[in-house]
């Protein structure tokens, strides 16, 4: 009940400040299982894409939140779990070699495990394959998690999304957001072609996201 | 008829005005709807005519929107009306800032503009502190904003960035705040009828913009400043002003002005409004965009708001101050 109220309130504030406009180019908003993958420029990206989705999709779509940022205070933890229904992931230190984050590498805990679990239970998810926030306009190279999920769940639709202007609303290190119109553009779904290697696929996925900047 | 209208109380008179406005709108909209309905089933006219009709329906939509806003503002009282105009100013400034590139160093100045300057200005209006409200932005804010920017320690494009922000505040906040301020002007023998004055200003300015637009479409005259506006020329501008001012003068019975006075203030408001529209067009061209909406068609409903209110933003302060100066209201 409280979560619903806070959700409404938050939605109102986000719409007042940014418009939270969703632009569906390439695919309609549809209640099928999807992985939305988007560029990452601000912590507010998660809130933006959550607000831009229509009500019916918002309830079946779970954003991915970095545990070290979104769960470090009780308030943020409560909002991410109760309002956003987020899936926490552990963020590894930014590796110099992007292939270091490969899931097939032996590690104690698979960072993708919570995502796999969410997808198994039939939810859609929102991921930011850059892993960390970019500082320039260009998204960084995509990490391989997207490829791993795409090959493991071939029936889930992969939808690229471009989040525009959010970094201007709340630049790194600021607390108070500024009202500036933002939009989330959703593009045509892509899929892993038969026999496609990891790197070419990730580059293609990144290009699909960047292409949405100018439509 | 006239006797009957005079016998009504001010409130009833304003209500009658809204009844007439909405009645006219309903008739025109119904006609436009059936026209487009018939065209869709059985097209008689060519594509340009169709485009004209679509354009006209869009203008009609704007008029509806404005009329409803004013009706709400009037029905719920002066404070609500002021809050309503503050919201419009907020959305207009949001659009303005979205399309003017800002840097990280501007963040604090932007917070100041949106969350301090805007509420304070409209609060000054609501409490009728006219002496402070006319100088708050041009004096205090214009000196405070650069200070906030300088403290952000980013000298690149400093003058340009500050000029943009100050211009945005001037047009969207300062200009817009003068519309509800009209509600608080007091003319002897005109108590309770200030809503007419707001209606008068908006009606006259919108008429001049509309007439000017229609005439420049019909006439094939060369535009005066083609790089800024492909439609602006002095002839259609003059006709627009003349028609709107005459209409304003004919409506002098709803204002505290006599015929000649109403004509004069209408001319002033129309010149300010149409010139303001031109200035905003130049700004848009500078940013390389045809209008202030977000790219493509939006769903938020706040898109292209600035296009609709820019003439008003320029006309309101000039109208307000010239009326206040001349009549001492």
Image (spheres, helix red, strand yellow):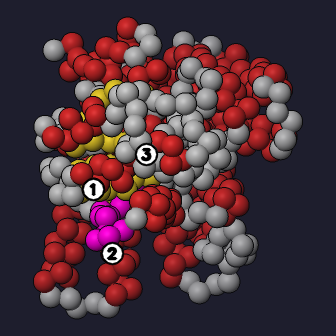
Residue in the image at 62% along x and 23% along y: A173
Q: Position of residue A37 (x, y in %)?
A: 37, 49
Distance between mark 2 and mark 3 Cα atoms: 58 Å
Residue A215: x and y in percent read 46, 65
The residue that mark 1 highlights is A151
Please indicate whether residue A6 sits to the left or right of residue B190 in the image: left
Q: Residues within 10 Å of mark 3 (few under 14, many from 20)?
A: some
Chain on which label 3 sits = A
Residue A79, above or below A121: above
* Relative to A32, B308 lies left or right: right
Q: Residue at horizontal 27%, vertical 41%? A: A125
Q: Position of residue A23 (x, y in %)?
A: 36, 55
SS at mark 1 in the image:
helix
Give, as a single range, the part of the protein colored magenta: A184-196
Which corner quadrant holds the N terminus of chain B?
top left
Q: Residue at x 70, y 76 (%)?
A: B226
Residue pointed to by mark 2: B53
The image quadrant where one finds the C terminus of chain B is top right
Judging from the image, mark 2 belongs to the subunit labelled B
Percent position (x, y) of residue A86?
Answer: 29, 28
- Rendered image quadrant of residue A157: bottom left
Q: Distance from label 2 to label 1 (Cα)?
A: 52 Å
The residue that mark 3 highlights is: A102
SS assignment for the magenta stretch, majority: loop
The answer to whether marks 3 and 1 mark residues whose Cβ atoms lie closer than 8 Å is no
């Amino acid at each position: 009940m409280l979560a619903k109220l806070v959700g409404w309130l938050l939605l109102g504030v986000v719409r007042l400040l940014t418009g939270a406009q969703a632009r569906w180019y390439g695919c309609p908003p549809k209640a099928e299982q999807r992985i939305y993958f988007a560029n990452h420029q601000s912590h507010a990206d998660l809130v933006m894409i959550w607000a831009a989705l229509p009500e019916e999709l918002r309830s079946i779509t779970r954003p991915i939140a970095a545990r070290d940022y979104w769960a470090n205070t009780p308030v943020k933890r409560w909002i991410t779990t109760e309002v956003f229904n987020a899936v926490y992931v552990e963020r590894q230190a930014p590796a110099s070699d992007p292939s270091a984050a490969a899931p097939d590498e032996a590690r104690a805990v698979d960072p993708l495990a919570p995502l796999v679990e969410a997808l198994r239970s039939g939810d859609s998810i929102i991921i930011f394959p850059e892993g960390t926030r970019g500082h320039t306009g260009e998204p960084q190279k995509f990490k391989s998690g997207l490829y791993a999920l795409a090959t493991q769940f071939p029936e889930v639709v992969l939808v690229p999304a471009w989040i525009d202007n959010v970094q201007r609303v709340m630049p790194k290190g600021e607390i108070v957001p500024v009202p500036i119109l933002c939009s989330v553009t959703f593009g045509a779904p892509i899929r892993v072609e038969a026999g496609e290697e990891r790197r070419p696929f990730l580059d293609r996925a990144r290009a699909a996201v960047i292409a949405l900047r100018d439509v | 008829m006239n006797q009957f209208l005079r016998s009504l109380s001010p409130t009833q008179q304003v209500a009658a005005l809204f009844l007439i406005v909405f009645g006219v709108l309903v008739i025109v909209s119904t006609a436009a709807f059936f026209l487009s309905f018939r065209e869709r089933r059985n097209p008689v006219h060519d594509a340009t005519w169709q485009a004209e009709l679509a354009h006209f329906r869009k203008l009609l939509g704007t008029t509806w929107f404005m009329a409803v806003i004013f009706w709400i503002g009037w029905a719920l009282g002066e404070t609500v009306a002021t809050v309503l105009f503050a919201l419009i100013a907020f959305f207009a400034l949001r659009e303005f800032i979205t399309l003017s590139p800002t840097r990280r160093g501007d963040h604090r100045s932007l917070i100041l503009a949106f969350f301090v300057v805007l509420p304070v200005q409209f609060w000054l209006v609501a409490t009728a502190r006219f002496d402070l409200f006319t100088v708050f932005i041009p004096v205090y804010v214009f000196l405070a904003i650069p200070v906030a920017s300088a403290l952000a320690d980013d000298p690149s494009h400093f003058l340009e960035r500050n000029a943009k922000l100050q211009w945005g505040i001037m047009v969207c906040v300062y200009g817009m705040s003068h519309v509800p301020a009209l509600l608080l002007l007091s003319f002897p023998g005109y108590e309770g009828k200030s809503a007419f004055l707001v209606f008068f200003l908006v009606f006259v300015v919108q008429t001049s913009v509309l007439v000017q637009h229609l005439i420049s479409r019909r006439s094939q005259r060369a535009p005066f400043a083609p790089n800024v506006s492909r439609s602006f020329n002095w002839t259609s501008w003059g006709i627009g002003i003349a028609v709107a001012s005459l209409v304003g003068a004919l409506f002098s019975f709803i204002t505290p002005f006599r015929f000649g006075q109403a004509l004069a203030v209408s001319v002033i408001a129309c010149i300010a409004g149409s010139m303001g529209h031109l200035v905003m067009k130049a700004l848009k061209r500078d940013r390389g965009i045809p209008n202030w909406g977000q790219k493509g068609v939006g769903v938020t409903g706040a898109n292209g708001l600035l296009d609709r209110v820019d003439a008003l933003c320029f006309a309101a302060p000039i109208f307000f101050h010239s009326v206040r100066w001349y009549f001492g209201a």
